[in-house]
């Protein structure tokens, strides 16, 4: 009789190698998290679901158009939908609050304009902290304002407008979309710089204000080129100046405010991209990289520049410093002109 073969429990060299490989694969994520940190690992797989981009204004405006162009390009690059959500109200506060109270995971984005820096100055008890409850991503674009007056105003240039306002205080008026909006504060900036007084007339939006400015019921308005240049070139309004540091390629015939005798005058409207507060730096950097790549695409860059905007596409740190400077500038103006909430 032959004895039954006894199976050996000693592993073969091949099975041992397989076991070591399996253990290594299982341990890889833990090792990566230990070496790089969990946020770096999360950033590698970000985004894994759709993102939302909140526009805190009504559909159809310049900010909404820019946001939708940016969202479409970023979605194409990242392979996940970027859903634009309009949440207008209270000069951008309603939509901003919805993002401020969202998780800091990078999936809730927000486009903001100068009202983001102005609201802390003119609105008491904001429902969020503009510095701590948002993560800067990138400054999308910067656009100078255009100053235009009604044809009935007896002034051919900025200096004549200033002389007229000084001779007859409160005889001229300016339109804006509300107290604390960019158009309001840039008008206040002009009054402060030129030592003049004018009457502020508020509207729900530029489209409501335009008929009154064209007819002469209101004397003047500040707005972007895209809105005002068609009326200026048709003769319905008289263009006076642009508010940036240099003339613009799309309206080179208009001098700057500095060239017009108001030295040091520099005010722009802008669009910036933020996320909810507390987003890990690797994810914030990933969003900034994707946004900058989208903004440098020939299609999107051409669309923005055609509207008179300058594409910026800077870093999160640079945007953070810019927002602090903007808030400080408007706070100083509010103190100078005694603008109260």
Image (cartoon, grey):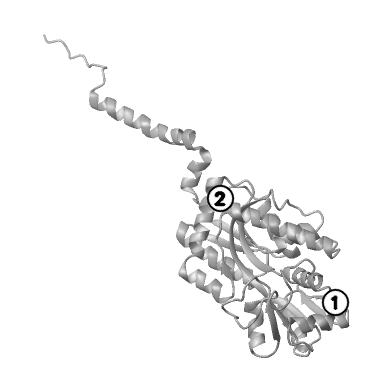
The residue closer to the viewer here, 233 or 40, is: 233
Is residue 81 visible from the viewing direction of this image? no
Q: Position of residue 74 (x, y in %)?
A: 50, 61
Q: Nearer the viewer, mark 2 or mark 1?
A: 1
Mark 2, other Cα within 10 Å: few <14 / some 14–19 / many ≥20: many
Q: Which residue is mark 2?
A: 284
Q: Which residue is mark 1?
A: 199
Q: Residue at x 63, y 70 (%)?
A: 143
- Give the SS element for disc 2: helix
Indicate the quadrant where residue 246 lies. bottom right
Q: How many angstroms separate mark 2 from mark 1 (CA)?
A: 43 Å
The answer to whether residue 86 is left or right of residue 34 is: right
- Give the SS element for disc 1: strand
Q: Residue at x 54, y 60 (%)?
A: 82
Between discs 2 and 1, the one toward the N terminus: 1
Q: Residue at x 57, y 45 (%)?
A: 280
**Which residue reaches farthest top?**
1
Is residue 322 visible from the viewing direction of this image? yes
Vertical arrangement, residue 212 with respect to residue 203, above or below: below
The answer to whether residue 167 is left or right of residue 329 is: right
**Placement of the N terminus among the 4 image quadrants:** top left
The residue closer to the viewer here, 46 or 306, is: 306
Q: Residue at x 75, y 89 (%)?
A: 151
Total labels: the figure holds 2
Vertical arrangement, residue 149 with respect to residue 18, above or below: below
The answer to whether residue 39 is left or right of residue 178 is: left
**Which residue reaches farthest left?**
1
Q: Position of residue 212 (x, y in %)?
A: 77, 84
């Amino acid at each position: 009789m032959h004895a039954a073969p006894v199976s050996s429990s000693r592993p073969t060299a091949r099975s041992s190698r397989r076991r070591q490989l399996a253990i290594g694969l299982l341990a890889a994520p833990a090792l990566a998290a230990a070496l790089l940190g969990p946020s770096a690992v999360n950033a590698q797989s970000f985004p894994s679901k759709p993102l939302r981009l909140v526009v805190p204004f009504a559909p159809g405006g310049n900010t909404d158009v820019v946001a939708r162009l940016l969202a479409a390009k970023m979605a194409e690059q990242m392979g996940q939908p970027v859903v634009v959500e309009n949440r207008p109200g209270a000069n951008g506060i309603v939509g901003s609050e919805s993002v401020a109270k969202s998780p800091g995971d990078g999936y809730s984005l927000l486009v903001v304009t100068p009202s983001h820096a102005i609201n802390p100055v003119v609105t008491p008890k904001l429902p969020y902290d503009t510095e701590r409850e948002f993560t800067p991503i990138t400054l999308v674009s910067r656009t100078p304002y255009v100053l235009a007056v009604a044809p009935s105003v007896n002034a051919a240039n900025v200096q004549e407008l200033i002389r007229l306002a000084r001779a007859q205080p409160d005889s001229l008026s300016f339109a804006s979309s509300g107290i604390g909006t960019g158009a309001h504060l840039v008008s206040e900036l002009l009054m402060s710089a030129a030592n003049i007084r004018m009457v502020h007339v508020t509207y729900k939006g530029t489209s409501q204000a335009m008929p009154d400015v064209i007819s002469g019921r209101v004397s003047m308005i500040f707005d972007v080129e895209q809105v005002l240049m068609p009326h200026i070139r048709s003769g319905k309004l008289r263009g006076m100046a642009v508010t940036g540091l240099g003339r613009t390629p799309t309206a080179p015939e208009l001098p700057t405010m500095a060239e017009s005798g108001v030295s040091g005058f520099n005010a722009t409207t802008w669009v910036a991209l933020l996320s909810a507060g507390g987003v890990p730096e690797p994810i914030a950097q990933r969003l900034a990289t994707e946004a900058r790549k989208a903004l440098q695409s020939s299609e999107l860059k051409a669309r923005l520049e055609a509207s008179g905007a300058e594409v910026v596409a800077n870093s999160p740190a640079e945007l953070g410093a810019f927002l602090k400077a903007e808030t400080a500038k408007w706070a100083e103006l509010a103190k100078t002109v005694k603008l109260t909430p």
